[in-house]
Amino acid sequence: MLGREITWLPAVENRGEGVFVAFKPDEIRHWSERSDVRARGRLLMGGFDRWRSEHKQSKRDFPGLPYIMLRSLSHLLLTAVALECGYPPPAASANACTRARQATAS
């Protein structure tokens, strides 16, 4: 039986869940040099240039093919996990977050 005065509340600290994937920089470079990837990149860049011509105030730069590949892969992975767990795909894509950085030579 609950008391009339609440003296405590349940607490949860949720930091989320994630999937970490690392790629070898040489493999990304090799992939981005393929003729079919370069052709697709030109199409995407053309679309971005058209968007930029309509949004002249924007300071955004084209993110590059490696980022687009990582972003696409993150959506595919989250969709696969969501479907495996019984959730509809839109639930996964709403939470996709991609963090990418250039590898540094050591």
Image (cartoon, rainbow, N blue to C red):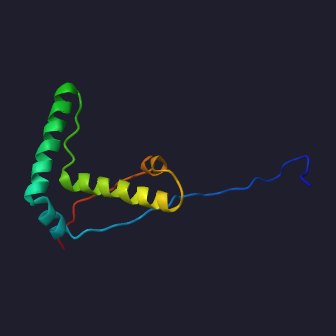
Q: Is residue 29 above or below residue 91?
A: below
Question: Relative to 5, is 72 on the left or the right?
Answer: left
Q: Position of residue 56 (x, y in %)?
A: 19, 26
How many numbered marks, from 0 up? 0
Q: Tell which residue pokes out farthest to the bottom in this image.
A: 106
Q: Is residue 54 above or below residue 87?
A: above
Q: Position of residue 91 (x, y in %)?
A: 49, 49
Residue 91 versus residue 17: which sits nearer the camera? 91
Q: Is residue 106 above or below residue 29?
A: below
Q: Residue at x 28, y 57 (%)?
A: 70
Residue 61 lies in quadrant: top left
Q: Position of residue 2 (x, y in %)?
A: 89, 52
Q: Residue at x 57, y 57 (%)?
A: 14
Q: Which quadrant: the C terminus?
A: bottom left
Residue 94 versus residue 7: which sits nearer the camera? 94
Q: Which quadrant: the N terminus?
A: bottom right
Question: Relative to 63, is 18 on the left or the right?
Answer: right
Q: Is residue 5 above or below residue 12?
A: above
Question: Relative to 4, is 84 on the left or the right?
Answer: left
Residue 23 versus residue 80: which sits nearer the camera? 80
Q: Residue at x 26, y 59 (%)?
A: 101
Q: Position of residue 6 (x, y in %)?
A: 84, 49
Residue 38 versus residue 64: which sits nearer the camera? 38
